[in-house]
Amino acid sequence: MSPDPNLYVIAAPSGGGKTSLIAALLQRDERITLSVSHTTRPPRPGEIEGVHYYFVDEDTFLTLIDDGAFLEHATVYGYHYGTGRAAVANQLLQGYDVMLDIDWQGARQVRKSFPGCCSIFVLPPSLNELRNRLSKRGQDSTEVINKRMQQAREEIVHCNEFDFLIINDDFDAAVDDLYGIVRHRAPARPQQRERIKALLAELLDIV
């Protein structure tokens, strides 16, 4: 187990690839574990209760909020998501580094409760590539994809609130970047830094 376990927050727009990156990281390092969130959205094909999410109805979720059970919670695309406070504390006490797969809203809440946490935002190579990824899923209508693209822009606006940025262009290299951040607090590949600036300027008109 890690001598000084820490909490890592990873966010990305839908289709950014953070779930796949986290899965690859967990395979690489057994000292890292993923916190399983609660959600009110229905399971997607292949998702398993207690592995990918705890799937609950809205009344149950609201009761958990009232009981103070969540470290953070947010509403995304009309569904509620929340991270169990006790589960995260228990994993940290066992010596694991804990990954939270959440959005920028949840990340903001976690930073208030855990100021020492490390936050990472995963960027797509471009908005066109992001749309391609969403389309290839074959899970959403054109209308839903358009909404996700609009939401993606709104989410990327908040990426500068995070400690580290990764461009998920080359998957294996992006996994290396993520591992370097978690184990060594190493920034993105040097050749990516200028590309990140250019990408943000293109998407958000910021430098």
Image: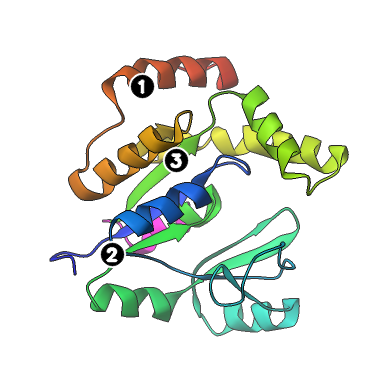
- The answer to whether 80 is drawn above or below residue 76 in the figure is below
Tell me if residue 55 is in the magenta stretch. Answer: no
Magenta span: chief secondary structure: helix
What's the distance in space between the residues labelled 3 and 2, CA to CA?
22 Å
- The answer to whether 110 is drawn above or below residue 51 in the figure is above
Q: How many numbered badges does the structure rendering display?
A: 3
- Location of residue 49 by image quarter: bottom right
Residue behind mark 1? 192
Residue occupying the point 59% across, 39% down:
155
What's the distance in space between the residues labelled 1 and 2, CA to CA?
28 Å
Q: Nearer the viewer, mark 1 or mark 2?
A: 2
Residue behind mark 3? 121
**Residue 22 locus on image (x, y percent):** 43, 53
Helix, strand, or loop for circle 1?
Answer: helix
- Location of residue 188 by image quarter: top left
Residue behind mark 2? 30
Kindly check if marks 1 and 3 are in contact, taking CB atoms under 8 A apart as contact. Answer: no
Q: Residues within 10 Å of mark 2 (few under 14, many from 20)?
A: few
Q: Earlier in the sequence, mark 1 or mark 3?
A: 3
Amino acid under disc 1: Gln
**10 and 29: which one is in front?**
29
Left/right of residue 104 with respect to residue 42 in the rendered view: left
Residue occupying the point 56% across, 39% down:
16
What's the distance in space between the residues labelled 1 and 3, CA to CA?
14 Å
Q: Earlier in the sequence, mark 3 or mark 2?
A: 2
- The answer to whether 95 is drawn above or below residue 180 in the figure is below
Q: Nearer the viewer, mark 1 or mark 3?
A: 1
Residue 146 visible in the snapshot: yes
Helix, strand, or loop for circle 2?
Answer: loop
Residue occupying the point 41% across, 78% down:
87
Amino acid under disc 2: Glu
Highlighted magenta segment, given as a residue range? 108-116
